[in-house]
Image (cartoon, rainbow, N blue to C red):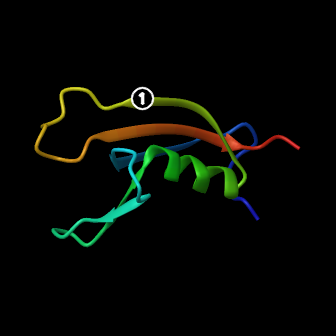
Amino acid sequence: KMFLRQGGYIGVKENIIKESDHQFDLDPVDHSIVRTDSGFKKIFREAGLELVSVAMQSDFPTHLYPVKMYLLRPLQN
């Protein structure tokens, strides 16, 4: 059961890694998993979510993983 208002959206803001042979990387600092853009999009599809919009966070320090923001909504049946 989804607890989202009718017509509601879900915002996701995540660190990403560049596309490569592997779809994720373990961050040794905080032990989180950092995924590729295509990896996140696959998870969203499998969760029944439609990608409405995507944007990169601007002016982010280059020594950190880049951050991508996704706007999602449940797939319409």
Does 30 sit above or below residue 51? below
Q: In which quarter of the image is residue 69?
A: top left
Seen from the viewer's position, the closer of residues 43 and 5 is 43
Label 1, secondary structure: give it: strand
Q: Is residue 66 toward the left or the right of residue 69 in the image?
A: left
Q: Quadrant of residue 76?
A: top right
Q: Quadrant of the C terminus?
A: top right
Q: Where is residue 49 in the image (x, y as percent from the top left)?
A: 68, 47
Q: Position of residue 66 (x, y in %)?
A: 26, 41
Residue at image point 76% right, 42% down: 6
Identity, as a three-letter code, of the amino acid under mark 1 = Ala
Q: Where is residue 8 in the image (x, y as percent from the top left)?
A: 66, 40
Residue at image point 13% right, 37% down: 62
Does 7 sit above or below residue 3? above
Residue 9 in view: no
Q: Position of residue 34 (x, y in %)?
A: 34, 58
Residue at image point 35% right, 48% down: 16
Instruction: Give the residue pinned by disc 1.
Output: 55
Q: Residues within 10 Å of mark 1 (few under 14, many from 20)?
A: few
Number of numbered discs on residues: 1
Residue 59 in view: yes
Residue at image point 60% right, 40% down: 72
Q: Is residue 33 toward the left or the right of residue 30 in the image?
A: right
Does 2 sit above or below residue 6? below
Q: In which quarter of the image is residue 22?
A: bottom left
